[in-house]
Structures are given as structure tokens and as C-alpha cells.
Image (cartoon, helix red, strand yellow):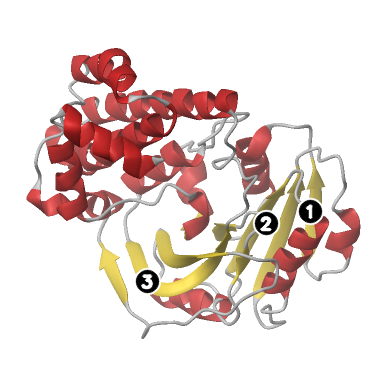
Amino acid sequence: MQDNLFLSIIIPFYKVELSLLDRCLSSITEQLSDKQAWEVIVVDDASPESPAEVCRRHPLTRLVVQEHRGLGGARNNGMRQAQGTYVLFVDADDYLFDGTLNTLWKMLLTKQPDILRFGFQAVTGFSRKHVRQKPLAFKTFETGRQLMEATNLYDSACFYAFRLNLATNHGIVFEENVFLEDSLFTVRLHHVARTVVVTSLKVYAYFQRPDSIVRLDEQPHQEELVSRHWDNLLALNNMMHSEPAESARGLRRKCRFYVIDYLRRLFQTEDVNTVMDDYLPSLRQRGLFPLPYQRAYGFKYNAFCLLMRSRVGMSLLSKLSK
């Protein structure tokens, strides 16, 4: 790999406390070295409060301002602006654990993967916390499809570093002005990827903010999330059926687990009778329900499948999902 390889770290910004953005940028820029080629791009998605002053306090940080297009639009713009070989997304209210970027950098240099997947840990509170690391380990998959067949795929785009040209050469972008824009992006990226490396290194601190997009309790918001989840599920199902059976195995696994995520989201807002009468028929019509037993998918998947076969089981799942 060439010596001028570098990493573009893209941070979308919209209605996040400036102190959190400052924490995020500090966690990144404090790890940067003059001997390494980096760039940090903050994309201001027309936020009411400008992040310009915070960005000026951090070296190698470039601010891009755009009209409001949502998280997906900000990430797309960041990729258009990026000059690095690899891209890493960090949300403005999250941060990176100390001492992890250099290790991540070395993995990219030595392994040269299309995608590098790393670990994350949920954090609370506003002070940066350290993380206890396990002995460093990694596993290499020859293709992204192979990884999707063998393990569950994280939806969040923030848990991967990937080659920029993997996305641009295949026209893979985020949907704009919608929720849950990560799911299809990460699936499409892995479906065309060659070498994928999975490491045990915990890099990403995922801040548990009560007012985040996926945690707002307002009924209209939750209904919109259910609708978006359904749209993504249909897109995954169509993608799976457009592929030959052999190359669709990973997509089939992802689709089945996405059905579980969809049903769990429904149980948070609907009663069991409504789920059975209004939602399960649409899943059955498309061959997405009932979910088949698959030993390779693990105990939790198969336990969910078993419980979904009876009203009593669904009632239990409904209570557990609240």
C-alpha cells in the first residue's frame, strides 16, 4: 500500500450539543500524529447552532456546510468531500476510545481489507471513559458475502472502516432525509466487498442519549420508525430474490434477522392481536414468516422462532420487548 494512504473521518452534525462534538473531536485529534495522513470532516447539516468555533479548536478538521438533508445526506456529502483511501464515520455525540486509532491504522496498512469491522461499547455520562480491551484478535473473510453467511451484520455504518472506492465504484450511497439509513448501506457494501477483517478491538464509544433518533418514545416517531423498518425489509427481500441462491445466502440470513428486529419494534408499540392480524399476514404473503429453524443462527434466533409460533409465546416476547 502506498505511503500516502490516509483515513477520512466523517462526522455529521445536526442539533447535537457543542460540548459533545468537542468531546468527539478531542477523542480523535488527540490520537493523530504528524507522521500519519488524516483528515477530519465535520458536515454541518444546517444545524441551528454552528459547529464552526469548535472545529477551529481542533487540528486537521475541515468544516463543510450544507442544506438540511438528514444524516444520510450529510454522510454522502462527507464521502464526496473525502480524499482518503478509507472512510470512518463517527456520530457527533459518540467518540473513539483512547489509543485505538493507531492500532486501527496499522490493521488497515497490513491487512489492506475492503472493510474492517471493529468493536464498540455503549457508554453513558458526558465524561470520556476508558475501555477494557481483550487480547487483540482478528478474523479474515474472503468476501463480505461470506461474513454475512457466518455472522450477524451490524446495521450501523459507524462500526466499520471501508475503502471509499468500494462505495463510489458501485454507486452505494445512503438514503437521504429518512431514518434507519444505515441498514441497506452496510448490506450493499458487504455484498460487493472482497476481503473483510473483523477485529476484537473496541474502538467506538456509543453514547446512550435518551433523545436519540431510535429512543424517542413519541407514538408518531415510533410509527415512522416501524414504517421505515418495513421499507428496508422489503428492499432486502427484493435484493435477496434478485440474486442466485448461492450468492444470496448472506442476504437471506440478514433478512431473517431483520424480520426479528421488525417484530421486536412492533411489540414495543402494538398489542399481540394487532401484530397477528395486521402485520403477520403481510410477512406471510412475502414468505418472510414463519421464520425457519436454523441451527447455525444460534440459540436466540431459534428461541424467537419457537415463541413466535404461539399466541402465548408472542405475548411473552411482547412483554420482553417493552
Q: Which quadrant would residue 5 be assigned to in this image? A: bottom right
Residue 189, position as x, y percentages in the image: 41, 45
- Residue 93 bears which disc, if any? 2
Q: Residues within 10 Å of mark 2 (few under 14, many from 20)?
A: many
Q: Earlier in the sequence, mark 2 or mark 3?
A: 2
Q: Nearer the viewer, residue 183 or 245?
A: 183
Q: Looking at numbered disc 2 in the image, what kind of residue is underneath it?
A: Asp
Q: Which quadrant would residue 246 be assigned to in this image? A: top left
Question: Dot 1 corresponds to which residue?
Answer: 17
Q: Quadrant of the C terminus?
A: top left
- Circles 3 and 1: CB distance less than 8 Å? no
Q: Is residue 278 above or below residue 47?
A: above
Q: Nearer the viewer, residue 303 or 16?
A: 303
Q: Is residue 255 above or below residue 40?
A: above
Can see residue 298? no
Question: Dot 3 corresponds to which residue?
Answer: 199
Q: Looking at numbered disc 3 in the image, what kind of residue is underneath it?
A: Thr
Q: Nearer the viewer, residue 67 or 233?
A: 233
Q: Earlier in the sequence, mark 3 or mark 1?
A: 1
Residue drawn at (36%, 26%), measured in percent from left and top? 235
Task: Say which element carries label 3.
Answer: strand
Residue 166, position as x, y percentages in the image: 45, 49
Give the Cα distance between marks 1 and 2: 8 Å
Residue drawn at (30%, 25%), measured in percent from left and top? 272
Residue 295 located left or right of residue 75: left
- Closer to the camera: disc 2 or disc 3? 2
